[in-house]
Image (cartoon, grey):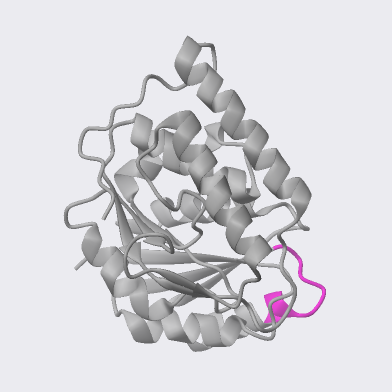
Amino acid sequence: MTRALVVIPTYNEIATLQRAVMRVLAADRRASVLVVDDGSPDGTGDLADELARAVPRVHAQHRSGKLGLGSAYRDGFTWGLAQGFDVVCEMDADLSHPADALPALLDALDTADVAIGSRYVPGGSVVGWPMSRHLLSRGGNRYVRTLTGVPVRDATAGFRAYRRSVIETLDMATLTTDGYAFQLEMTLRAWQAGFRLAEVPIRFVERQEGSSKMSRAIVAEAMLHVARWAWELRTGAAGATGAPQPVGATVQ
């Protein structure tokens, strides 16, 4: 049976963490959870420890401060590989990602190497966003597709699953981006390496508790990274990981 690790980064998510973790465990018996807490002052880390002591499939990792989303995933993925997991997944703690879609993500890896929980393929949707946020997200994804050619409609999605071979090949130590940019870099580099990409429709619900970590600075940083990566792809400049190889890439 496939062993999957769902990495959940946290910073001040005490109001929703337990529900998020228990929904994952209830959704799929193949899944375990690693909470990576960045020293949350609201006690989220303590709650993660309580859950880890009480539930065999839950683990907690503590970091010294707010070190960033991409950094948390890199640390969590590295831990997962060391523990022998076959699949590592990304998921937010704020209940915006539907845990009941996890089985579909894992099943998609029967024929793909990366499965993305997508808001923008048929059957996908977003609930609770103002029009400005819809336009920003859709526009950002169109910008990514246009500049890089990556065949993914939701390259910024934060609910996804990777075969361990993808993480091993991409080498977490060579990734330095954060936020939206981390999701984009992982998508682009997996595609460039020739891995098969699949999108699974999900219903994304805007968080009801806590505060969003998204900011204009994070979005701007991501767009600048995309422009640089696109230029490197077109010119073969140092830093590019090679010409895109769309073999096996799919958008479902």
Write the residue at 44% across / 53% down.
154
Q: Please tell me which residue lies in front, 170 or 220.
A: 220
Report the magenta residues as a range: 38-46
Asked if residue 181 lies left or right of residue 169, the reply is right
Q: Residue furthest right?
A: 41
Write the residue at 35% across / 26% down.
244
How many circles with numbers are drawn on the protein? Answer: 0
Q: Is residue 113 magenta?
A: no
Is 82 above or below relative to 170? below
Is 94 above or below relative to 248? below
Q: Please tell me which residue lies in front, 49 or 144.
A: 144
Where residue 77 appears, as percent x and y from the top left, is 47, 52
Write the residue at 35% across / 36% down.
191
Whether residue 126 is visible: yes
Where residue 119 appears, as percent x and y from the top left, is 44, 64
Residue 8 figure quarter: bottom right
Q: Quadrant of the N terminus?
A: bottom left
Where residue 150 appears, as percent x and y from the top left, is 39, 37
Q: Quadrant of the C terminus?
A: bottom left
Residue 56 figure quarter: bottom left
Asked if residue 70 lies left or right of residue 243, the reply is right
Q: Please tell me which residue lies in front, 155 or 53.
A: 155
Asked if residue 137 lies left or right of residue 241, the reply is right
Whether residue 185 is visible: no
Residue 69 figure quarter: bottom right
Where residue 62 appears, as percent x and y from the top left, is 67, 64
Is 54 above or below relative to 64? below
Principal secondary structure, stretch drawn in magenta: loop
